[in-house]
Image (cartoon, rainbow, N blue to C red):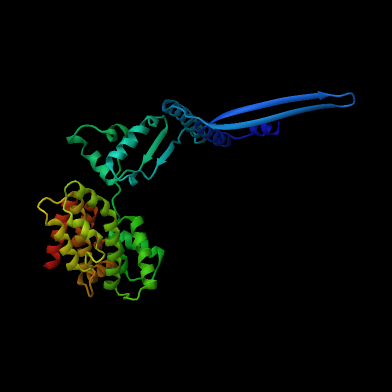
Amino acid sequence: MARRLWAGGQTSGVRLSAEATRRLRQIRFLQTLSVEHSGQAAPLSVQLGWKWGRQWAEQPLSLPDVVAAYREFTTEVAAWWRDETDNRGRLVIAIDELDRIAEPELAERFLNEIKAIFGIKHCAYLVSVSEEALVNFERRVVRTRTVFDSAFDHVVHLRPMLMSDSVTLLRHRLSGVPSCFWMLCHCLAGGMPRDVLRVARMMFELHRRSTVGKELDAMTAQLVALEVQAVKRGFQQRIVRDVAEGGDPKLVKLMSDPQWPKITARGLRTAADELLADPEPTEASTALAAALLYYSVVLEVFRRDSQIVADWRHLDLGAVRRKPLDEDPLAIDLARAHQQLAVDPPTALQQLRQVQGHLGS
């Protein structure tokens, strides 16, 4: 009785919250209720008994049933929110981490399975997709339609941060650090906010326990060494798969060698040339070569007494209303090259060769 009286006084928001829990449980479990009554009479006494029980069993609902129930409940929530906001509100549902699906084909398959829940009135979906999936969407004019065309109404391309943005972000986290170290974090992360913070944390950990050196060039070499080892681990399975399909077996030996490549600007360039020496390099070897060449350029830019870094620091300190740091051609070329590493390694290689030519001049 108390539960029923309390339920009668609930607000719509609380009721919908309880309804969401109930529907989620309904999707996963089948409920079984059992009620048992007993009674016994004796000459001097009467005994009455009542027993109540509930059991939950997994319930395999069909996909159409789940979709129909979800759409019904979402429509109800959207209508409630419209009432709460004088018909101005809209229900927004975010589907995050879709960009973590490495293969674009798998991402398309996932979207194809869930797009039946889209198209609810006053309900918008915000979905994060990978750069590769975005490229496929932008090429829709010259190829057949895919699930991205039929599922999304609008695509927003989130560009990486500019160098001045990365420096400002990190300055808000910690003051007193020379801006050249923040610029190094930006270049190693390619302007991706999460990676900029990750590299910064890694840099402080190295600074805390480093015995090699805490100057800019020494810190750059240590960070690049960690990044190269991470890249090698990421490409190892792809290299082994390529070898199984007829690729060069020497690549497997190189990948298993902890001393390869040598963490210097020249050593990384040589390693990249080794990977590209094959007349028909695989996609994995090309992508790995582009990454190594990028880190080679970073080591070259942030070497000891680098005039480029000195110029960047001058531009950064002199920026008041404009952002001349982000207009530096080398900073722009580096950002573009890093952006192409995961999307189009051959283009990244071409851009990095141009950067090398700029550094040589």
Residue 208 position, x and y percent, is 39, 72
Residue 32 quadrant: top right
Q: Is residue 290 above or below residue 117?
A: below
> Residue lying farthest right?
44
Residue 7 quadrant: top right
Q: Is residue 320 left or right of residue 276?
A: right
Q: Quadrant of the C terminus?
A: bottom left
Q: Is residue 328 visible?
A: no
Total label count? 0
Residue 68 position, x and y percent, is 44, 26
Residue 187 position, x and y percent, is 27, 61
Residue 182 position, x and y percent, is 32, 65
Which residue is painted at 34% across and 62% down in the image? 199
- Please name whichever residue, 212 or 80, is drawn nearer the observer in this view of the structure: 212
Which residue is painted at 32% across and 43% down in the image? 129
Which residue is painted at 73% across and 28% down in the image? 50
Q: Quadrant of the N terminus?
A: top right
Q: Is residue 148 above or below residue 36?
A: below
- Please name whichever residue, 28 or 10, is drawn nearer the observer in this view of the structure: 28
Which residue is painted at 26% across and 54% down in the image? 236
Q: Is residue 109 left or right of residue 142?
A: right
> Residue lying farthest left?
279
